Image (tube, rainbow, N blue to C red):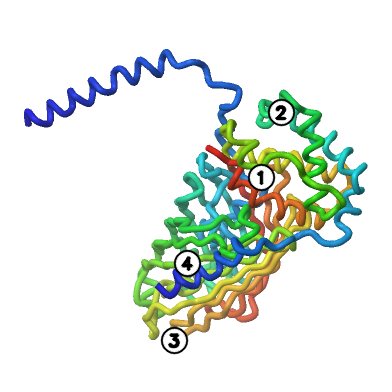
Amino acid sequence: MRLALLLLALAAPAHAQPVSHTRPGDYQAFGERPGLVRLMDRLMVGLLADPVTAPFFQRNQRRIKEQLVDQFCALLEGPCEYKGGAMDVVHKRWKIDRAQFNALVEVLQDAMAAEGIPFAAQNRLLAELAPMHRDIVTR
Amino acid sequence: MRGVVGAVLALLCLCRPAAAQSEAAPPPSRFDVPGPLFSGKLPLTGGVASLEGSAGGGLTPWALIGGQGTRDQIGGYGFATLVRSQDYELRVAGATVGLWDRVELSVAQQAFDTRNVGAALGLGRGFTFHQTVLGAKVRLAGDAVLEQDRWLPQLAVGLQFKDNDRAGVLRAIGARDDTGVDVYASATKLFLAQSLLLSGTVRLTKANELGILGFGGVDDRYEPQFEGSAALLLTRRLAVGAEYRMKPDNLAIVDEDDWADLFLAWSPNKNVTVTLAYARLGTVAIERGQRGLYLSLQLGL
């Protein structure tokens, strides 16, 4: 019982107050807006080359890339605003499982590495993205 | 009886139309693409095989479920591990299955070769203790990797049933038993923004040197032992870390020390992991200051 309370105490505050994992300078480490545009171009090539992720990116590629640039830019505390739909809304028609979600993470890691983004900065961004699994993984 | 038959018939009748419907169902839409069957976890996020087979670090279990299977998948691995100190050699081979990222079952066969020490003790040169370890682990809550906005770690409980084949020698050195059960609880969390994984385990055990020297002795109580690991991700496929494992000291005639190691785990792809460690084992039976290399190869899905 005491353990359960402790666990609740540990789990609860995070809901109330999301912590930001990114640091000042991470936006620059990603090459600012031009770097993010290059990253998304590379990411889309990778997503279409991977048989696990390809079926999800057959349409609207330009729009997806633009929205990802805005979203990542905002998460990295750059001068952008993400105006796309909420994650649960834009993914709700799809059936996406954990392995498919993770496959995208791996393609993104490949793309970030190929763009020369430092590993620590990659991980700080991934820490921002990872909790989105709750809205994206629908299977 | 007639009621049961009626119920079965009724069920069959209910199932028929459903089955017919599913045959005629339209092909899945482009929004419903089946995921891969195997290896959906991110590299290294299934841990590596510990000396007792359970997934974790090399010395201690973690709350992670072994293998590369996600909650929709089955995963697992086979592994072989060699630890060689100045006076002893421990060889371990085993296999672990991870079911739906929820349950882990493992089996490990340990061979502890006393080399020249066996001769000194009158057991014969190369006298070897064999121990079989059957393990089960259940993930209770949390996700060590994805829940980066919460403090709750991944939590698991497990047990390891151990059976040593040298009952006669074990009795002679004062061990109470040649079989034993360890029970443990683990909490593991990846702090991704820091590229740091921390794990802690509390184990209730009577095992002397993992059980290789039997179970219990002058001291025959279950005592909680703490085990901890810290690992830093250098790349997606390479981690460096350290572990510490407290151990009991139950036998009257020999001392037993805590164990520690420094390790490097490398996963060139999802199917292969190699772990290299430098382990400090302290006094083992009659030999003091034991230290040496730990090498483990793991193949799986």
Classed neighbour count for the residue bearing mark 3: other residues with Cα under 10 Å, few (<14), some (14–19), many (≥20): few
**In the displayed structure image, the side of residue A103 where residue B206 appears, left or right:** left
Q: CA distance from mark 3 to mark 2?
A: 67 Å
Q: Amino acid at mark 1?
A: Val
**In the displayed structure image, the side of residue B72 where residue A119 appears, left or right:** right
Q: Nearer the viewer, residue B79 or B12?
A: B12
Residue at 74% x, 32% y is A47
Q: Are marks 3 and 1 on the same chain?
A: yes
Location of mark 1 (residue): B272
Q: Is residue B239 visible?
A: yes
Q: CA distance from mark 4 to mark 2?
A: 42 Å
**In the displayed structure image, the side of residue B133 where residue B263 appears, left or right:** right
In percent of width and height, residue B126 lies at 54, 65
Q: Which mark is residue B252?
A: 3
Q: Which mark is residue B185?
A: 4
Q: Amino acid at mark 4?
A: Ala
Question: Which callout, 1 or 4, points to the residue nearer the camera?
Answer: 4
Question: Which callout, 4 or 2, points to the residue nearer the camera?
Answer: 2
Q: CA distance from mark 1 to mark 4?
A: 27 Å
Q: CA distance from mark 2 to mark 1?
A: 30 Å
Location of mark 2 (residue): A57
Question: Which callout, 3 or 1, points to the residue nearer the camera?
Answer: 1
| Chain name for mark 1 | B
Question: Which callout, 3 or 2, points to the residue nearer the camera?
Answer: 2
Above or below A49: residue B146: below
Q: Nearer the viewer, residue A56 or B103?
A: A56
Which structural element holds mark 4?
strand
Which structural element holds mark 1?
strand
Q: CA distance from mark 3 to mark 1?
A: 42 Å
Above or below B181: residue B91: above
The image quarter containing residue A136 is top right
Q: Are marks 4 and 2 on the same chain?
A: no
